[in-house]
Amino acid sequence: MNEVIGSHDLLLVTLDTLRYDVAAELAAAGETPTLAGLLPEARWERRHTPGSFTYAAHTAMLAGFLPTPATPGPHPRLFAGAFPGSETTASGTWTFDAADLPSGLAAAGYHTVCVGGVGFFNKLTPLGSALPSLFDESHWERGFGVTDPEALPNQIDRVAEVMARQPSGRRLFLLLNVASLHQPNWFYLDGATSSAGDTRASHAAALRHVDAHIGRLFALMRRPCFVIVCSDHGTAYGEDGHTGHRIGHEVVWTVPYGEFILS
């Protein structure tokens, strides 16, 4: 990452609430061709999230603690705030002297932008402003949120506006938090009704919707661009009696992760 920082734009896409098992199944079945076409070997990497809900996971990720490979470690990190005794800071780790990654990148000359999705990015309350406040520039409106079936296309429209005014001589760090997988997602499944509620099948339908639109996001990014696409946490649809997240269940802790370079 010491060769990437300063020479590449950075894009972090968090597919909020996306389960690893659903993502892996759809990739293997050829139902998410855009994402699979960019992932190494067309496969998601199985990782463990640093937090079981959006605020906890994003706070950790934006401090450099990305989802951890679900194999015995230690696993060197891409980014790390400088602190003594870190066992996951290696020679390839880009370290920053700040409490969070956006501030560290800003100090390195990056313009940092957040386009939010779920409520922790809505800037309507002090808590909803905490994550966006880490960035030089942040965007949220109701059309980006969980209740709008066109949230992702709406967000990408805003990204297009952001990209159109980026100065060529300044590097960019963009976080896009995609709300489409988060409940409610029943409206992405043909024939589903609000009374039936969300299911694992509607979660999968939401991912197919995301895949159908996300190619436009990647086309907008300047080259070269280092991209991380991952989930912040999963969610339960009745497994062992559980529904939702913020619990220590396998379907919540296990998330899909991928990284690649647009060149």
Image (cartoon, rainbow, N blue to C red):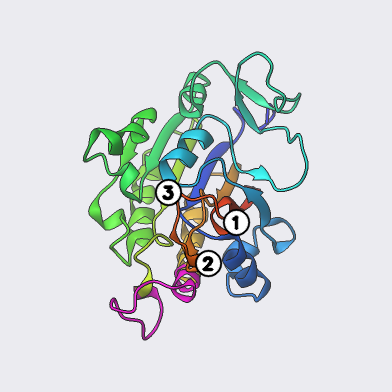
Amino acid type, mark 2: Glu
Q: Which residue is mark 1?
A: 250
Amino acid type, mark 3: Asn
**What's the residue at 45%, 42% (across, down)?**
175
Q: Are marks 3 and 2 in contact (CB under 8 Å)?
A: no
Q: Nearer the viewer, residue 71 or 39?
A: 71
Which region is colored magenta? 187-206
Q: Which residue is mark 3?
A: 177
**What's the residue at 51%, 31% (across, down)?**
171
Q: Quarter of the image for the N terminus: give it.
A: top right
| Relative to 132, 243 lies left or right | right
Of the residues tagged 1 and 3, which is closer to the observer? 1
Is label 1 in a helix, a strand or a loop? helix
| Relative to 248, 263 lies left or right | right
Location of residue 246 in the rendering, given as x and y in whole percent from the top left corner: 45, 49
- Residue 147 falls in image quadrant: bottom left
Location of residue 2 in the rendering, given as x and y in whole percent from the top left corner: 68, 26
Sequence-first disc among 1 and 3: 3
Q: Nearer the viewer, residue 138 or 183?
A: 183
State the CA–CA distance, disc 1 to disc 3.
22 Å
Is label 2 in a helix, a strand or a loop? helix
State the CA–CA distance, disc 3 to disc 2.
26 Å
Sequence-first disc among 2 and 1: 2
Q: Which residue is mark 2?
A: 239
**What's the residue at 48%, 59% (across, down)?**
235
Sequence-first disc among 3 and 2: 3
